[in-house]
Amino acid sequence: MKRIWLDEVSGSSCELRDDAHHYVKTVLRSREGDIFGILTPEKFCTAKITQITNKFTVLEIVEECPVKKPDYRLSVYQCVLKREYMDFAVEKYAELGVTEITPVISARSMKDVKDKSFNRYHDIAVKAVLQSENQHVPIINPPVELADITADHEEKLFFYERKEGKEPVKLKGKNAAIIIGCEGGFEEEEAEILKSKGFRVVSPFKPVLKAETAAVVFTGLVRMELE
């Protein structure tokens, strides 16, 4: 089933115009009678196209139900990467079912996170959620300095490439926070700060991964533990 995102749906039908209409009519090449899934922040609807014109598309709501929210909490603190890598990380976090993403300013991270970046992150996350058939779009928080991180999660994991020996990812609950570094990793002082905040150092294997690779691998490992 094709899926689209709308900020809100009310009543027994909805009318798409502008970008949404163009996407359904031209990009997806839809026809009257096609069935669509509509995802909003609060509900998921099954809808049928009843009319397509040059200016708008009308969909009849056939069925709706509340959004299926995860039975876990997974927050990712991601040290800010260059634009293309940060966008990639946000996309993969949304696909993997992360519930919350917080950009982090660290000693070796990018320092400038523009306001318009948050709209882009949200759009990327929405597209990834639709593609992966999830129903929860992760919350994108404002950036925070590493020293100012406050995480109240049951489990807090810190992936540190300089840790001696191996420490596997093992979780006891379903409420976890993880922090992923940027290129160059964390400085020793930052590692100590994170430990003082209750983050447990883990190092599942020895290869030093690129930041965008670590984002996928480590988050995937944690998601497996949360299942």
Image (cartoon, grey):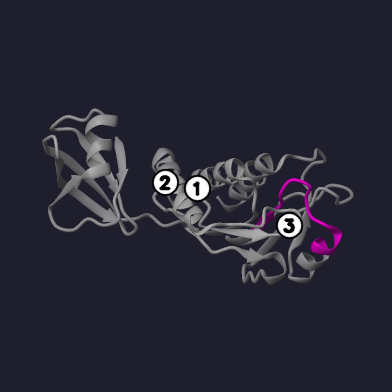
Q: Position of residue 216 (x, y in %)?
A: 62, 42
Secondary structure under badge 1? helix
Amino acid type, mark 1 = Ala
Q: Residues within 10 Å of mark 3 (few under 14, many from 20)?
A: many
What numbered label is drawn on residue 134?
A: 2
Tag 2: amino acid: Asn
Residue labelled with disc 1:
94
Q: Mark 1 and mark 3 in contact? Answer it, CB < 8 Å.
A: no
Per the rendering, the mark at residue 188 is: none
217, 54: nearer the viewer: 54
Distance in Å between CA atoms under marks 1 and 2? 8 Å
Disc 3 marks a residue whose amino acid type is Phe
Specify the farthest residue to the right: 164
Q: Residue at x 48, y 56 (%)?
A: 118
Name the side, left or right, on which 107 lies relative to 4. Answer: right
Which is more toward the observer, 148 or 172?
148
Residue 225 on image: x %, y %: 62, 50
Tell me, yes or no, whether the highlighted magenta stretch contains residue 186: yes
Quarter of the image where one finds residue 102: bottom right
Q: CA distance from mark 1 to mark 3?
A: 20 Å
Q: Is residue 46 left or right of residue 207?
A: left
Q: Which residue is mark 3?
A: 158
Question: Where are the magenta residues, as a range?
Answer: 178-191
In the image, residue 34 sits, relative to residue 110, either above or below, namely above
Q: Pick whichever of labels 1 and 3 is earlier in the sequence.
A: 1
Q: Secondary structure at mark 3?
A: strand
- Mark 2, Cα crowd under 10 Å, few <14 / some 14-19 / many 20+, is some
In the figure, 135 relative to 176: above or below? above
